[in-house]
Image (cartoon, coloured by chain):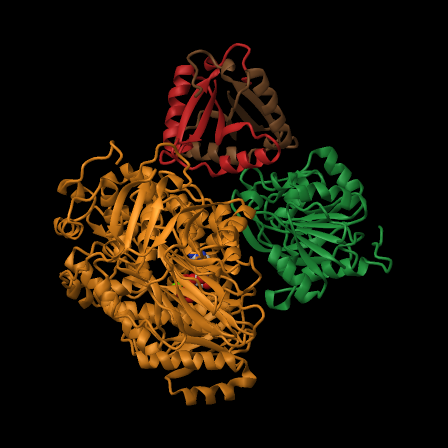
Chain colours: A brown, B red, C orange, D green
Amino acid sequence: MKVRVLVRLKPGIMDVQGAAVKHALAGLGFSELTDLRVGKVIDVDVADATPQEARARVREMCQQLLANPILEDYTIETVDDLAPHGAAR
Amino acid sequence: MKVRVLVRLKPGIMDVQGAAVKHALAGLGFSELTDLRVGKVIDVDVADATPQEARARVREMCQQLLANPILEDYTIETVDDLAPHGAAR
Amino acid sequence: MTGAEPKVTLDLALDAGLTAEEYDRILTRLGREPTYPELGLFSALWSEHCAYKHSRVFLARLPQSGPHVLQGPGENAGAIDIGDGWAVVFKIESHNHPSFIEPFQGAATGVGGILRDIFTMGARPIALLDSLRFGDPDAPKTRHLVNGVVSGISWYGNCFGCPTVGGEIAFAPEYAGNPLVNVMCVGLVRADQIFRARADGPGNPVFYVGNKTGRDGIHGATMASATFDEHAEERRPTVQVGDPFTEKLLLEACLEVMRTGAVVGIQDMGAAGLACCTSEMPARSATGMDVELSRVPQREEGMTPYEILLSESQERMLLVAARGREADVRRVFAKWELDAVEIGRVTAEGQLTARLNGEVVAHVPVDLLAEAPKYQRPTAEPPGLAELRAFDPLTLPEPGDYGAALVELLASPTIASKEWAFRQYDQQVGINTLVLPGSDAAVLRVKGTSRALAVSTDGNARQVLLDPRQGAAMAVCEAARNVSCSGGEPRGVTDCLNFGSPERPEILWQFAEAVEGIALACRALDVPVVGGNVSFYNETSGQAILPTPIIGVVGVLDDASRRATQWFQAPGHRVALLGPPHVSLGGSEYLWTRHRRLAGRLAPLDLEVERRVQRAVRAAVSAGLATATHDCSEGGVAVALAEGCVTGRELIGCMAALPADARADVTLFGEGPSRVLVAVEPERVREFEALMAESAIPWRWIGTTGGDRLVVTVGTKAIVDVDVSRLEGAWRHGFERHVA
Amino acid sequence: MRFGVVVFPGTWSDCDFHYVISEVLHQPVQYVWHRERELGQLDCVVLPGGFSYGDYLRAGAVAGRSPVVEALGDFVARGGLVLGSCNGFQILCEAGLLPGVLTRNECLQYRCQSTHLVVENADTPFTRGLRPGQVLTMPISHGEGKYYADPETLARLKRQNLVVFRYAAADGSVTKASNPNGSLENIAGIVNAEGTVLGMMPHPERASETAMGGTDGLLMFQSLLGSLVEDGSFLKR
Ligand SMILES: Nc1ncnc2c1ncn2[C@@H]1O[C@H](COP(=O)(O)OP(=O)(O)O)[C@@H](O)[C@H]1O
Ligand SMILES: [Mg+2]
């Protein structure tokens, strides 16, 4: 079961890296960006699990290790969450 | 227009981060993972653009800066790609 | 054999980088056509990068032995005895091609490779130095490369935990298509516990240890043996990715397993990976090896024998253990959570036998693999060189304002402070660094002894272009002089020779002359070359880099507390200029910065004077007479004085007077060998004068430190009179301004 | 005083701490492997600098969940002292033994340089020999040293006087220019409410010998030794 975890900085936290990338893009002429933030995507493959089981396990992983609750929020996605033509792997 | 870019290492490239995280999770008892890879998610907000326009612009940004073509592949997603109940923002 | 593999033909061999004659030689020796994996073995091991085909005949000229040499060239690194039972192991390596393709990972894996060369000898790495060359500092591409390379070095070295204590960064348009990333590493080991890359004792087990094998870097060695063209981008899939964390574990595991006594020999899997180790190790021991490739830990599925043999995945070693001690090896690597898999045995037959699931896929004599043909190709002086040398810089106008000219020179990115780079490097881990980056040489203590090591890397390619023999000799002298300035006695040299294609006679001439120059200087200074690296084919679309030999010198201070740094310590100290008066604007930084000219003649080099000057400086430092010592290099005596004023913690001015025996720009900015500034406390002036008289070298007092201006009088005119804070500003921001 | 220096895969200041404690301070010291849970025989545990587990996910994240760090809870509850420097500080925060988190330097680059620290809390076993306002010189070496805590936590740190060091100028003034990594309010080191767990980004072990350019780090070790009272327990705040 393939599961995708998105770990992103919480809204209030300043994203220095994102700001730097946004600045660099503006320098290349991409000045239409109103916002840019950088986070992590963690693609995991969980053996022998239903989507529900996999989600639950991955949530535990996030709580225990993958995200730091002081700084980060996480979102868990499975294929279900993507539209049929989706860009998922 | 909100666009999400997923930047991931190309398949053959060693994922140092992913291997370390997988190992650490196994140490915490999550031994059911058959694979784990770490990439970047870049959330951008493009002013005044249709999904098509935004996609095209963001593709250019990926080619010029956001992804390192030697090491990384990228996927661009807009809200369209996510199912209605989706985990999108 | 694996069905998918192509049949080997002459065309395929040519594609693999072998010549028709070489292929013939293989056919004759084998008595049959090689298999596809076998062709891969020859292609990699007979590549220029692995085999030094075009350079070996010349390198034989270098002095390689001496009373302190414990290991000369031919092993993973050289080793020198430093007393008290300790030895230093050191070597310099290039990672030019990979760094151009992917600056961050290229530079990072360059650091990883040289670290392994050091710890595979049993030494703990204690210092790194990086010598870098880039194109025009104002080009956006250059900024991208500098940032990528510096952060790659920073990431790998810092994460691994070895301090980066020195190096250099210079710019010239010739490096635009081919930047240079040379990294030197120095390690410490007990003199009687050096390990070597041998496969002695038929029957001994062969272990694969470290990271898993993937498809990365296949053909790295062949790539480093070809010039770049417009298709360079297409070669990208060969890029390797570094893992400094695993390297750190590999270091600890290797040093620990060595202490158990279970290790017979060990070699790092660098260029040409497993193929290289399984042939070179037995070749050194007149044995053979029989390995089962399916046992090699693999990161990807379906790898072919060819790929497994030639992969250049990082952080791996091949280890030959003593039979019966397998458990020790497994236990130590398990502790560090690394793979250690027995993949075969040492044999007596002198063959490398590689199998896949028992079936033989390669069976080749190791001596044939390890002994590539040697070539002595024709050399010819480059046309136009005589003309270039004949240029007279005095035909150019003098600067109107000498103070402004000095400020401009200090701000040139080649001379200006490199702090922007080295503050990204951990300089202190290991708590040995007594002199941090920023002085002529870095100094590291040897714990448990009174001794210290001094290290420096240098090379001035402009001088080498104009006169390869003398320019290369001057590079040896400068690196050694930097070490001497800190108080260290030069003990050993490692050299990284970066040149264009040796198949071009004028390039090979540069190379041959440069090697000769290094040999002459090393003989005169009595320092052997114990290891090094040749990087040819540094060209893009027919444009070769400047001929760039980089010289690394390691020296020893018997008393670590008797050392010197380049900045003035206090006002009121007398400043002496040691060395001959000869200088020239030919090939100087001044001529380039101000007039964009690279031409002219070099000032003469007298190796005997050089030797005596260095001895005199060391004597002054070890007698505690020198409060500062600074080598005069790029920018001449004026820049050296300014650096004395601005590079320390406090700014200190100086009043200096120089004789008016040439045009003032020559006097101030002219470059010449064997010249050193020394500052002396007023109370010790007599003693110093006596020492100089004994040393039989040309020297003179030229000034006194103090005040907040640098004033230089030539003849009777004070032609430089600048506030030191203005000099400092130019020097401090001149580099960063271009790259940040 | 019996010291233990923890070794994680990827730690590199372990040898430096060991050297300073044994060769400069002449105190008994042993390495503690990261799988160890038995710390009873020690008075002070040092979590040194380095890149534990490569710091590949977040600095200190994996080490913060290792057996030895789990055992630190009990060790601290029994009155043991913990000093985390550099990666050690990151690990303490990740483990929740100290509040807040250390994030990527604001300049987005690694920084190895000398810094000045102004002492704010001289009422811990680690700083008892110092006085508030005193300026120390100590190097930093890290890529992720920007301290962050939410506003409530920050308010609590200040209310309880738990900020031990701030980055400062040579005269002790806390300025933006003297902040090498963008840390919240220039915070360089904090302590737990009991004063027994200190986390700091700078490297005291690199400033413990004249030959290494300064001995301000040694003052901290000397404070520690001075805090040990005869019955083997520590002076409480
Ligand atoms: N890339 C670098 N990495 C580390 N240190 C560097 C680097 N470049 C220059 N340095 C340091 O900066 C100082 C000045 O370098 P350089 O201008 O080459 O001096 P010199 O001419 O005396 O050799 C030296 O201490 C050198 O080690
Ligand atoms: Mg130099």
Residue at left 76%, top 55%? D127
| Residue C158 locus on image (x, y percent) | 51, 51
x, y (%) of residue D84?
A: 68, 49
Viewer-proximal residue, C348 or C454? C348
Q: Quadrant of residue C518?
A: bottom left
Number of marks present in the image shown: 0
Quadrant of res B76: top left
**Which residue is most to the right?**
D231
D211 shown above or below C281: below
Ligand 1's image quarter is bottom left
Give left or right: position of D176 versus C81: right
Q: Is residue B36 above or below residue C144?
A: above
In the drawing, does residue C259 fall left or right of residue B13? right
Above or below, C653 against A56 in this view is below
Query: Taking the image as drawn, is residue C580 in sight?
Result: no
Q: Nearer the viewer, residue C205 or C12?
A: C205
Side of C27 where D38 appears, left or right:
right
Name the residue located 21 percent from the left edge and 65 percent from the top edge: C57
Query: Residue drawn 47% across and 90% down?
Result: C690
Residue situated furthest top in the rendering: B84
